Image: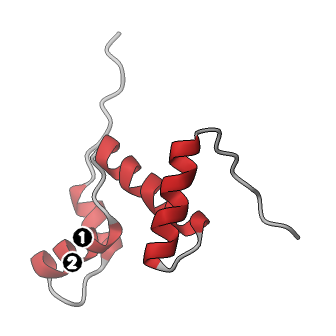
Amino acid sequence: MAEPQLSVRSARAREMAHRLARRERRSVAEIVERALEAYDIAQTGREPAQEFYARVSRDFGADVDLQKVIRENRLPNEGIEL
């Protein structure tokens, strides 16, 4: 089955993606995916997974029960005030 294709109408964006792909020796799709992921993280303020796991390992040690940590830090939803 063929991969979905992304159509870019901007000549500048297409040229940049191809130039970066050649320089990094990656596919254009990989370059676009990585750029979009970086943009998503920057805009939403989400912590990248690698940094999250490094922080959890540093704060809680090498062997951590993520479900336990989540349960301990979960707060009940008070609901709406009527």
Residue found at the very far bottom of the displayed protein: 62
The relative height of residue 27 versus residue 71 in the rendered view (above or below) is: below
The residue pinned by badge 1 equals: 51
Residue at mark 1 to residue at mark 2: CA–CA distance: 5 Å
- Quarter placement of the C terminus: top left
SS at mark 1?
helix
Instruction: Using the rendered view, name the quadrant where residue 11 is placed.
Output: top right
Residue contact between numbered discs 1 and 2, judged by CB atoms under 8 Å: yes
SS at mark 2?
helix
Q: Indicate the position of residue 70 as horizontal and vertical percent values.
A: 30, 63
Q: Nearer the viewer, residue 73 or 20?
A: 20
Q: Nearer the viewer, residue 9 or 52?
A: 9
Q: Indicate the position of residue 10 as horizontal and vertical percent values.
A: 58, 39
- Disc 1 residue crowd, few under 14, some 14–19, many 20+, Cα 10 Å: few
The kind of residue on which mark 1 rests is Glu
Q: Indicate the position of residue 75 as horizontal and vertical percent values.
A: 25, 46
The residue pinned by badge 2 equals: 54
- Disc 2 residue crowd, few under 14, some 14–19, many 20+, Cα 10 Å: few
